[in-house]
Amino acid sequence: MAYIEPAPIKDKGNPFESMMSRFNIAAQHLGLSEQVYNVLKTPSKQVIVSLPVTMDNGSIRVFEGYRIIHSNILGPSKGGVRFDLDVNIDEVKALAAWMTWKCAVVDIPFGGAKGGITCNPREMSAGEMERLTRAYTLAMNGVFGEDRDIPAPDMGTGPREMAWMMDQYSRAQGTTVNSVVTGKPVVLGGSLGREEATGRGVMISAMAAMEKLQINPFNATCAVQGFGNVGSWAARLLQERGTKVLAISDISGAYYNEEGVDISKAIEFRKENGGSLEGFPGAESISSEEILLLDVDVLVPAAVEDVITEDNAKDIKAKLIVEGANGPTSSKADAILNEKGIWSVPDILANAGGVTVSYFEWVQNRLGYKWTKDRVNRRSDRIMKTAFDRVYKTSQKYNTSLRIAAYIVAIDKVSKTYEYRGGY
Ligand code: GLU
């Protein structure tokens, strides 16, 4: 079914404006009052810090770090910290707002935030990364807090950086506070199942959408763009459920095998090859642009923002897009995909499995207790499925795409909570 939606109000390739154009459409559907609209569109706090760090060669480099709290209406703000050369304030603002909507869609009691440092982790030693992470955590004293703002991993960061953050924050407090950050190594109070949680949620969303579209996962094919934590887990779990993964890609290029790529082998290869798929023997090389245009049932963009744009959307052949990345589809591309009848399970729903298990990690740390992996998976699967069903129902009620429906669900929840709490 093709959906007709009002044209996006603004789209200049700026991620914050791209987020806002969807927000605006959902706000119109909900008839949001101007006052509440103004509150929800503005980040509640924006912190920019300069971080002088001694590099291994003795020189001092100054990095710029950000933490943007978009909203704490639903609870303490939650969101990852990104280390990447492309990090800039507009991107972090958009990512922070997406966290607000994401937490609201899966109905967990957190607001939204995001952090970032403009740097190239690929070119930094472990010592440099540690000093940078500790400097950032110290600079965020008064921002981070187990009941205030809780960071987590994102692009360029992982359990190692979360351990440093937890340690640095705990030193400043004079006591161990493991609930101040999630995505920690399991020995430090990380949750079982957190590592695969985002990819697992992508798989659950893909299965739920395939069921609605009457695509049998056992006969289905898929392509996964991006082979980091999210993409590789999504690919592995989809393959485990019978879906043939025809292509995968990372920064080194894209790899295609019409019989299906063996994902376990690709993960093994990547591990032995310094984290890259370059030279992967189990598939033929194709161009990075081509992977998005393959004739597959399911396309999982799990890399960066703005890869599906008005330039390539018309050539996409997948029936279903499941967004592992944040913001992979531009708002102008939405209209083209809707017209072609291609379904998108949007980022704020499809990749919410990560923050859901982050919430479980925080709950376990607060309880001083540990859940089994089975319990974590069962509960997160249930949350993801319930969220999908709620978004699907909303899309039917408002005759809108799943993306706009997800924004409607989220904005409705946050705005109602705001109205009950009241302003002054
Ligand atoms: N960075 C992840 C995201 O974009 C996880 C955030 C979290 O666990 O707080 O959803």
Image (cartoon, grey):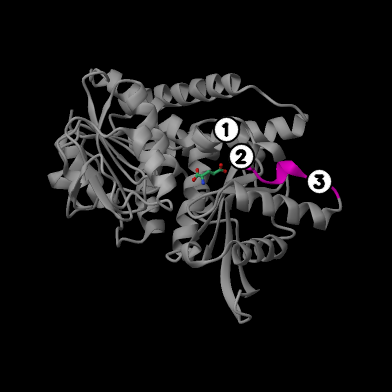
The kind of residue on which mark 2 rests is Phe
Callout 1 crowding tier (Cα within 10 Å): few <14, some 14–19, many ≥20 = many
In three-dimensional space, the C-alpha distance between marks 2 and 1, rounded to whole angstroms, equals 12 Å
Relative to 26, does residue 164 appear above or below in the rendering? Answer: below
Going from N to C along the chain, the mark reached first, 2 or 1, is 2
The amino acid type, in three-letter code, at marker 1 is Val
Please state which of residues 250 and 324 is positioned toward the viewer in this rendering: 250
Classed neighbour count for the residue bearing mark 2: other residues with Cα under 10 Å, few (<14), some (14–19), many (≥20) = many
* Amino acid bearing label 3: Thr
Which segment did they paint magenta?
A: 175-184
Q: Mainly helix, strand or loop, the magenta region?
A: loop
* Residue beneath the point at 62% across and 46% down: 77
Residue located 29% across and 18% down the image: 211
Specify whether 85 is left or right of 111. Answer: left
Q: Residue at x 28, y 51 (%)?
A: 279
Instruction: State if disc 1 and disc 2 touch (CB < 8 Å).
Output: no
Please give the residue where the numbered disc 1 appears in the rendered image: 357
Residue 126 location (% of width, % of height): 59, 61
Q: Say above or below: 305 vs 33.
A: below
Task: Specify whether residue 63 is in view.
Answer: yes
From the image, tell me which residue sits under label 2: 110
Does the closest atom of ligand 1 sit within 8 Å of the Cβ of label 2?
Answer: yes
| Residue 245 locus on image (x, y percent) | 26, 32
Residue 336, located in which quarter of the rendered image?
Answer: top left
Cα–Cα span, label 3 and label 2:
22 Å
Farthest residue toward the right? Answer: 174
Helix, strand or loop under label 1: helix
